[in-house]
Image (cartoon, rainbow, N blue to C red):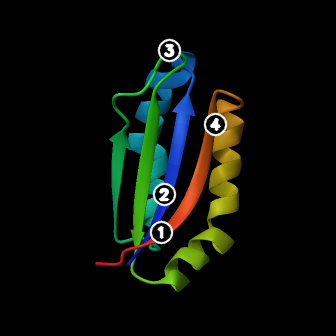
Amino acid sequence: MFIYNISLKLEWSIHEAWLLWMQEVHIPEIMETGCFTEYRFVRLLDIDEADGPTYAVQFFAATREDYERYITHHAPALREDSQRRWGNGFIGFRSLMKVVN
């Protein structure tokens, strides 16, 4: 099992609209690719939120090939849409993890 993790720090000015978009549009679009079996969407706690909240989304892929298929065929357009909608209102980083237990 592989976990594709996306961590995002948002500006307060986009927070409410972004959260709704993630829940109703973006996450469903990613899941519709068929590359992931499930996801978790969480908000980080006990951190400084003066500049805005921080979230993480974890998408679970059964195989490395499923993840690679997402990165190659789906991620570019979805990332472009996100950047077009929210511009510089967020910063993020992505990581790939493998479940070891």
Q: Nearer the viewer, mark 4 or mark 1?
A: 1
Q: CA distance from mark 4 to mark 1?
A: 20 Å
Q: Residue at x 39, y 81 (%)?
A: 62
Looking at the image, residue 88 lies above or below residue 61: above
Residue, far left: 101
**Residue 18 circle label:** none
Q: Residue at x 34, y 43 (%)?
A: 42
Question: In front here: 98 or 8?
Answer: 98
Label 2: which secondary element: strand
Looking at the image, residue 54 lies above or below residue 42: above
Mark 3 near mark 1, Cβ–Cβ under 8 Å?
no
Q: Amino acid at mark 2?
A: Asn
Q: Position of residue 71 (x, y in %)?
A: 63, 69
Q: Residues within 10 Å of mark 2 (few under 14, many from 20)?
A: some
Which quadrant is the C terminus positioned in? bottom left
Q: CA distance from mark 3 to mark 4?
A: 15 Å
Which quadrant is the N terminus positioned in? bottom left
Q: What residue sits right under mark 2 in the picture?
A: 5
Q: Amino acid at mark 3?
A: Ala
- In primary-sequence order, the first of circles 2 and 4 is 2
Q: Position of residue 31 (x, y in %)?
A: 42, 62
Question: In front here: 4 or 86?
Answer: 4
Q: Amino acid at mark 1?
A: Met
Q: What residue sits right under mark 4 in the picture?
A: 91
**Residue 97 circle label:** 1
Q: CA distance from mark 3 to mark 1?
A: 29 Å
- In primary-sequence order, the first of circles 3 and 4 is 3
32 to the left or right of 69: left
Q: CA distance from mark 2 to mark 4?
A: 14 Å
Q: Which of the 4 quarters of the picture holds residue 46? A: top left
Q: Residues within 10 Å of mark 4 (few under 14, many from 20)?
A: few
100 to the left or right of 22: left
